């Protein structure tokens, strides 16, 4: 393993990450909120640590292997999230303690959107901006990791069906070089962010709220500059814009790339994963809206308005809110929460297990039913027109098994800290799916949970964001063996 090369890369990443604290520092000076020093100290600590990692290893040059890629991917989020918590611990009398600051930072960079903060409206403007920016940076990192890097390591949702995708994805990359791929993704991501911000401003948001919410909408993060989230604005037009961009961001960015390059939208309707997501969300919206109407929870227009928004927000793992869905009648809260386990498409900023895995699990289940009827038949699992190799089918079941096992282990761990069952399973599910909202005691915020429970949830966020195996492989003796 090229440890010195990895330390050099981490040092560079940390120094680059320190530059992301400049915009919130400028925001602080612009609004004169008096907390610019928190970002200055954060920059200094990050740069010094980065230099300490980089300088002793700056001459280390060696071709990275697959094992190095796993370690870099895991360290990328862990190290940056830890250093990203510094301004949240340093901004004044209302600053967070180390546990809450790390929780908030991990929640931002993993685009989970769970928060321990109350009174967001009264925070300094620079801190409110910084939380949103963390999600935007994390969302971009997710897209590059999922589309450009993890497939080359043989893990991640994109690797599961790369043989099925036409054109530029044949070789797991949108363009011949990963650097070119990352650049193309940055252009698409930035363009969507700007378009979202402009749309929000035209709908009535001021520039500060529009910028902050465009960051978290395109990243499918869920952080807001207000305690009441999108509901603060009480605007159907703003809600529709949010729904539109949550949907766009829940589709694979590889599809956006193909649509941009070929100037046509046909790929969205040809892609099995995108079709499944549209049908799934359409069915869920129909069930939710009809239930809200029949139970007279809302009138006709508000039932459609709130039902549509909350279903898309929760199912895509964005976690924005315009209504308290946990108080909805019957099984709706549970149904919406379970939908977040599906999440969005592979190569998107959404969380969850990813639609492609759900499709393959369902198709394999149907294949086993058919084998009971025709024991000697050779039945292929197909996604679209392409047959899925058995190795990929086994990988999906391996992922699902690990997912369920970790979910129950962490749920028991959170319950052992004294948290009730509903809060425990929903908060772990929310963290593992990078959703944000939970039920029970964590339905409004996570601030009241025990510190140990918060650390378990931080681990759950990281596992969910890096698709579990990228982290689990680091704990195997074989990984560290020469």
Image (spheres, rainbow, N blue to C red):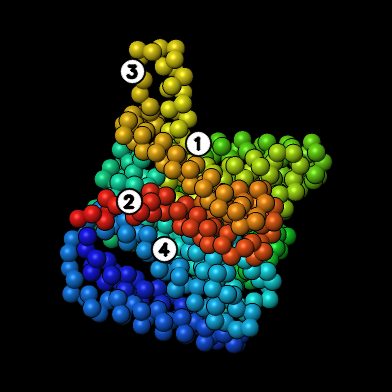
Q: Nearer the viewer, mark 2 or mark 1?
A: 2
Q: Give the quadrant of residue 200.
A: bottom right
**Rendered location of residue 108, percent (x, y):** 52, 64
Identify the mark at residue 378; answer none if there is no mark: 3
Q: Residue at x 55, y 36 (%)?
A: 279
Q: Which residue is mark 2?
A: 476
Could one spot residue 95 in this view of the protein? yes
Query: Which is nearer the N-term, disc 4 or disc 1?
Result: 4
Q: Which is nearer the eye, 243 or 424?
A: 424
What distance separates the C-alpha of mark 3 from that of mark 2? 36 Å
Q: Residue at x 55, y 78 (%)?
A: 89
What distance separates the C-alpha of mark 4 from that of mark 3? 43 Å
Vertical comparison of 43 with 308: above or below: below
What distance separates the C-alpha of mark 4 from that of mark 1? 30 Å
Category of crowding for the residue at label 4, using alpha-carbon neighbours closer than 10 angstroms: few (below 14), some (14–19), many (at least 20):
some
Identify the mark at residue 77; answer none if there is no mark: 4
**Rendered location of residue 338, percent (x, y):** 59, 42
Q: Residue at x 62, y 63 (%)?
A: 450
What distance separates the C-alpha of mark 1 from that of mark 3? 25 Å
């Amino acid at each position: 393993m090229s440890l010195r090369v990895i330390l050099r890369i981490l040092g560079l990443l940390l120094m680059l990450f320190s530059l992301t604290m400049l915009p919130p520092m400028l925001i602080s000076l612009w609004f004169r909120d008096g907390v610019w020093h928190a970002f200055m100290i954060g920059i200094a600590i990050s740069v010094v640590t980065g230099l300490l990692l980089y300088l002793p290893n700056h001459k280390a040059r060696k071709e990275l292997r697959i094992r190095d890629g796993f370690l870099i991917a895991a360290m990328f989020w862990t190290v940056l999230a830890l250093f990203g918590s510094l301004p949240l611990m340093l901004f004044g009398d209302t600053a967070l303690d180390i546990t809450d600051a790390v929780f908030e930072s991990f929640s931002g960079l993993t685009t989970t959107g769970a928060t321990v903060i109350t009174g967001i409206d009264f925070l300094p403007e620079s801190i409110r901006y910084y939380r949103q920016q963390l999600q935007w940076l994390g969302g971009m990192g997710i897209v590059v990791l999922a589309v450009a890097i993890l497939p080359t390591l043989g893990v991640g949702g994109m690797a599961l069906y790369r043989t099925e995708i036409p054109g530029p994805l044949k070789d797991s990359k949108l363009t011949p070089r990963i650097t070119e791929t990352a650049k193309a993704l940055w252009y698409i991501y930035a363009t969507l962010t700007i378009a979202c911000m402009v749309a929000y401003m035209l709908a009535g948001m001021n520039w500060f709220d529009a910028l902050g919410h465009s960051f978290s909408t395109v990243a499918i993060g869920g952080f807001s500059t207000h305690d009441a989230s999108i509901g603060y604005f009480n605007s159907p037009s703003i809600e529709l814009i949010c729904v539109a961009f949550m949907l766009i961001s829940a589709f694979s960015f590889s599809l956006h790339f193909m649509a941009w390059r070929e100037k046509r939208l046909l790929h969205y309707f040809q892609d099995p994963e995108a079709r499944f997501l549209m049908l799934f969300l359409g069915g869920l919206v129909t069930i939710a809206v009809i239930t809200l109407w029949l139970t007279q929870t809302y009138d006709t227009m508000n039932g459609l308005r709130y039902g549509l928004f909350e279903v898309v927000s929760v199912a895509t793992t964005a976690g924005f809110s315009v209504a308290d869905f946990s108080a909805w009648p019957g099984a709706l809260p549970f149904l919406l929460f379970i939908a977040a386990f599906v999440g969005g498409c592979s190569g998107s900023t959404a969380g969850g297990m990813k639609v492609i895995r759900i499709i393959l699990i369902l198709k394999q289940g149907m294949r086993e039913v058919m084998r009971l009827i025709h024991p000697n038949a050779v039945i292929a699992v197909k996604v679209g027109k392409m047959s899925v190799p058995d190795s990929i089918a086994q990988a999906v079941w391996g992922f699902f098994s690990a997912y369920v096992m970790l979910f129950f282990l962490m749920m028991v761990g959170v319950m052992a800290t004294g948290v009730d069952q509903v809060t425990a399973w929903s908060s772990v599910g929310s963290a593992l799916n990078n959703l944000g909202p939970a039920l029970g005691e964590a339905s409004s915020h996570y601030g009241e949970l025990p510190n140990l429970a918060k650390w378990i949830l931080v681990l759950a966020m990281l596992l969910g964001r890096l698709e579990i195996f990228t982290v689990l492989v680091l704990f195997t003796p074989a990984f560290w063996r020469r």
